[in-house]
Amino acid sequence: MAVRVDLNISLDGFATMTDQTPEHPFGLDWGRLTAACVATRTFRARVLHDTSGEGMTGVDDEYAQACFAEVGAEIMGAGMFGLHHARNDPDWWGWWGEEPPFRCPVFVLTHSPRPRLEMAGGTAFHFLSATPRQALDLALEAADGSDVRIGGGPTVVRDFLKAGLVDRLHVAILPILLGRGIRLWDDLRGLEAGYAVTSGVAPSGITHLTFSR
Amino acid sequence: MAVRVDLNISLDGFATMTDQTPEHPFGLDWGRLTAACVATRTFRARVLHDTSGEGMTGVDDEYAQACFAEVGAEIMGAGMFGLHHARNDPDWWGWWGEEPPFRCPVFVLTHSPRPRLEMAGGTAFHFLSATPRQALDLALEAADGSDVRIGGGPTVVRDFLKAGLVDRLHVAILPILLGRGIRLWDDLRGLEAGYAVTSGVAPSGITHLTFSR
């Protein structure tokens, strides 16, 4: 029953871009940050509903599998769900189509809650205005013994890290420099003190780094 | 005849601290950033004049060896040499004692040049006010076919990277978050485009990342 995070970041620490538009919800660089992840067999099957069984296997795919495994509830920020763009669209249901990959309750943190959304495949979006601790308590109850994943974006992840609520942080560090966006690592001095940190490099050139406690 | 850089940085990208004092010339966190490097057999022999032959061997030591190998001249900033603290001390000869580890001409970039300093062991400090390109031309001539190393600090390294003058950049990324200091990666968007990037993790937990062209 762990609280977990998985994020892709650039070498200079950027996890999300600030040039978000409806066409590029996470900015123009998002594709580069997530290309290796999107290419995995697990991502293609789970997120893109590609039933061909094609896609990369190996280290990056193992992390993609682990990312979804044993998650009983997810928490994400309003920006990740898309509410910053869809503030005036009561029918907005996120970026993930009719059958989102989460397959569990998803708690979306927003100062403007809206009615819950039941999607195909077991995903239900709940909108709430809450502190990290309050949201986590709800998510843990909904997860019923399984893990809770903090999906993002980086500002939300940082809030949970600063509150000491994350048990396992996995970052996939891409060997690229973006020079702009929202940094994951700001204001987290000494985070490593409460964790064991392990690292490994995948054939894709991605460094996978995991903080565990 | 390559232009090379080796730097230790934290996971959040800090290469030097801003809390420099005469007692802690590179700030209070410097020891943590460099501990694995300082523990190597090569560093102990070359910098600390420890003739016992003791010290760590393995991956980190191989990088320490490579750092000194075939360097015919070095370029560093005024801050790395200590001129920010020793501005009024005409006898300041750097942090490295009477026999510095460089054993070659060292070009110190400063807006307040002073007379050259001949040290034991082959190191000579030359002080000059010059652009990166001008300093590099002098250093290449002095290196006489060997490599030129840009020693630091991070601001000087960034200037050389932005000017497109660096052939090989090796960063040792420590799995720690410092949250303060001077970042190496600021304003280097797209740097990877001109380089092949390779990575590996040492048993110490350090990720060694090399940009080569």
Image (tube, coloured by chain):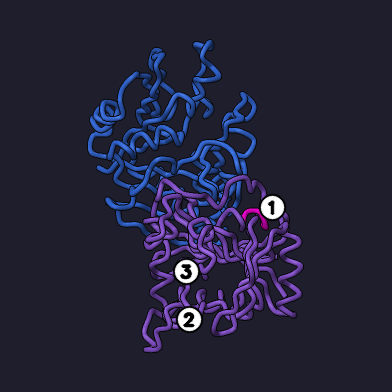
Chain colours: A purple, B blue
Q: Which residue is mark 1?
A: A162
Horizontally, residue B93 falls left or right of residue B31, namely left
Q: Secondary structure at mark 1?
A: helix
At which x and y percent is residue A166?
68, 62
**Which range is magenta?**
A157-162
Q: Chain of mark 1?
A: A
Q: Which residue is mark 3?
A: A95
Q: Main secondary structure of the magenta part?
A: helix
Residues tagged by mark 3 and mark 1 found on one chain of the structure? yes
C-alpha gap between disc 3 and disc 2: 14 Å
At which x and y percent is residue A153?
55, 58
Marks 3 and 2, the one that precedes in the sequence: 2
C-alpha gap between disc 2 and disc 1: 30 Å
Amino acid residing under circle 2: Arg
Of badges 3 and 1, the one in the foreground is 3
Q: Is residue A60 part of the magenta span, yes or no?
A: no
Q: Which residue is mark 2?
A: A46
Q: Secondary structure at mark 2?
A: helix
Marks 2 and 1, the one that precedes in the sequence: 2
Q: Is residue A194 above or below residue A92?
A: above
- Look at 76% across and 62% down and name the residue there: A134
Residue A181: which numbered mark, if any? none
Question: Which is nearer the eye, A28 or B169?
Answer: A28
Marks 3 and 1, the one that precedes in the sequence: 3
Amino acid residing under circle 3: Trp
